[in-house]
Amino acid sequence: MKKTEIAFNTETLPLSLKPFVTHASVFDSSSSEEAQTLYIKGAEPLFLKICQPGSLEREYRMAQFLHTQNSGPKAIAFESDKKHDYLLLEAVEGEDGTEAHHMNQPTRLVTVFGQYLRKLHAMSASGCPYPNRTSEMLTAAASKDIDLSSLDKYDYTPADDAVIHGDYCLPNVMMDNFEFRGYIDAGNGGVGDRHYDLFWGLWTLQYNFETDAYHELFLDAYGRDAIDPKGLDYFIEFIRLTEDYTL
């Protein structure tokens, strides 16, 4: 995770957030154009995410839930105004799955990456703030007039029966020398269909390693007993139609 020290004007922040940033060193750690992510190096390491209004509340609520399961960072504060959402989180110990010392041992990395997804899907869904995630996705697609008729051929009915991350990619799993420390950036998560996350696990391995050679190992590590090939095919097609990503 890159960190570039920057000068930051704390006067742009809501009053409640200023004490966490004043007198701290601030580093830009953004990985997308849609959100600014700042690493705050102060009395305790923190991350501050700044994004357009209405974009971070889901991540805040999912972070709260995952933290109760000892599987994510503590959400310290969430604020919103007319210009931005602000989410302040404790920094999770360790480094993400794309760090060199993880990527340099691909077999070990892919194995634990599959195991940590199974761990997430085995989590109790009690208290999860978004209990109908797949239903939400299907409704959103319909509202955009996306033709989903090609899904009918898979003879599969998606089920909201597992806690999903919603963006299960290598940068969103924190580890300390391969030991699990937490899931981050789970704003697209909730209780949904496990095959949605399985797609993104396969996609990130192909993207980050520039090969599909690790797909079978990932599925083996996750556990074939919990994978329905029809479900995986269904979500490969669903994500192609709705998000234009393919394997």
Image (cartoon, rainbow, N blue to C red):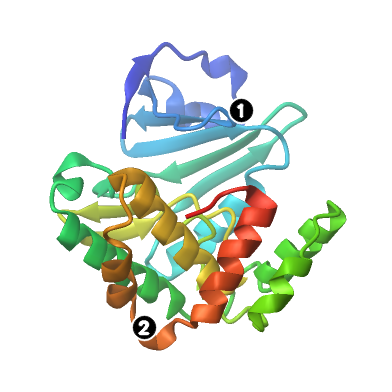
Who's the residue at 25% across and 54% down the image?
175
SS class, disc 2 = helix
Please state the horizontal and vertical placement of residue 184, each as a whole percent of the image: 43, 52
Q: Could you tell me the amino acid type at mark 1?
A: Leu
Please state the horizontal and vertical placement of residue 189, each as a whole percent of the image: 57, 61
On screen, residue 21 versus residue 65, left or right, reads left
Identify whether 243 is placed above or below 195: above
Who's the residue at 47% across and 15% down the image?
8
Please state the horizontal and vertical placement of residue 213, each as a whole percent of the image: 27, 58
Mark in the foreground, 1 or 2: 2
Which quadrant of the view contains residue 152?
bottom right
Please state the horizontal and vertical placement of residue 154, each as a whole percent of the image: 64, 78
The residue to which callout 1 is attached is 15
Who's the residue at 73% across and 26% down the image?
83
Identify whether 134 is placed above or below 106: below
Regarding residue 245, the answer to whether it shows in the image is yes
Task: Choose between 21 and 203: the one closer to the eye.
Answer: 203
Which quadrant of the view contains residue 21?
top left
Task: Choose between 45 and 101: the one closer to the eye.
Answer: 101
The residue to which callout 2 is attached is 224
Task: Choose between 123 and 34: the one closer to the eye.
Answer: 34
Regarding residue 125, the answer to whether it shows in the image is no
Assess disc 2: are there few (<14), some (14-19) or many (≥20) residues with their C-alpha within 10 Å of its C-alpha. Answer: few
Earlier sequence position, callout 1 versus callout 2: 1
Q: Could you tell me the amino acid type at mark 2?
A: Arg
Where residue 56 is drawn, which disc sits there? none
Assess disc 1: are there few (<14), some (14-19) or many (≥20) residues with their C-alpha within 10 Å of its C-alpha. Answer: few
